[in-house]
Image: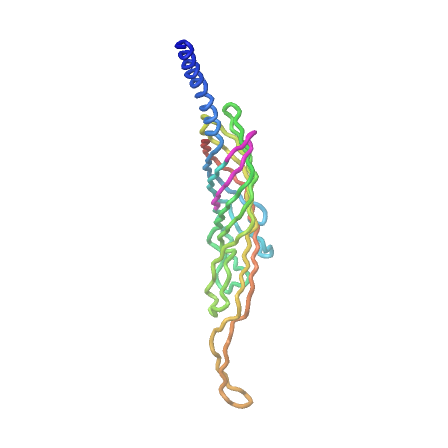
Amino acid sequence: MKKATLLIIILSFGSGLFAQPQSDSVRVKKFRNMGLEFSAGYSMIMGSYAALDKSNTKAGYAANGWLVQLTYHWLGPKDFGFAIQYTFQNNPLADSAKSIRPDGWSSGSLGPGSWSNHYLLVGPVFIKTFNKVFIDAKILGGIIVSSSANFTTPDPTDTSGMKKDINLGTGFGYGISAGIGYAFSSHLALKFSANFMGGWPTKNRQYYAQFLFYKEYRDPVTGLIVIEPVYSAPVTYEIKKLVGTFNITLGLVYRF
């Protein structure tokens, strides 16, 4: 009886020892299916975003700039998963924009200034490590919020023509990227990436007729002084731009 009891204790202890590594293995696997990436790099303009022709309504008058981004990813089975990415992108306006006066402006010019684009994107991601080689690819979609003088509209209630309203353009944004790098460990990798980013920010703004002042004049028939109100003309602005860039970034990926 005593021998049986001792045997049961030994087996229980041994099974506990063997069960512990299995738990650690599960925990290690779970430990690596999430990650954070921070990257920054150079942003090169493309297409209408770089156009300087006033006849092109989608011209962005942009120049090469920079971007920073933060990405969270979660991986499921077979190295595929889901990513959420925030990107801030800054592209200055071209020097020639200083001499461009958009249609409807009675004073001022488009430049100097810059484009500030905020992206919030989600989509599938693939991440794989071969020995020390780290690769990934993402196809993301979401929203773009753009700040630029291109979306500024003159206030028709200002008879001096000096007052302008600063607006934001919003629309669908996208990001397509591929990267390769070196994995220092199972947790940390240095990565070089190339990606296309862009979107279709738009702004629709309507100004209704508003009272400006009273105008006094003499009726040529009766000779009486007549006072009548003067209103601004109703105006509707529809501004559509096309953002397009090719970007090269360097970043760090931490997996946990």
Q: From the top left corner, tell me how far across and down residue 236 is, in percent.
A: 56, 64
Q: Is any part of residue 158 visible from this angle?
A: yes
Instruction: Give x and y (percent) for residue 147.
Output: 48, 52
Q: Nearer the viewer, residue 82 or 214?
A: 82
Q: Tell me the quadrant of the picture where the C terminus can be found.
A: top left
Q: Nearer the viewer, residue 71 or 29?
A: 29
Say whether residue 230 is magenta. Answer: no
The answer to which quarter of the image holds residue 221 is bottom right
Main SS of the magenta part reads: strand
Bounds of the magenta span?
74-89
Q: Is residue 107 above or below residue 184?
A: below
Residue at x 50% of width, y 55% of height: 168
75 is within the stretch colored magenta: yes
Q: Position of residue 78 (x, y in %)?
A: 56, 29
Residue 86 image position (x, y, % from top left): 48, 43
Tell me what residue is drawn at x 47 percent, y 35 percent: 250
Residue at the extreme right? 55
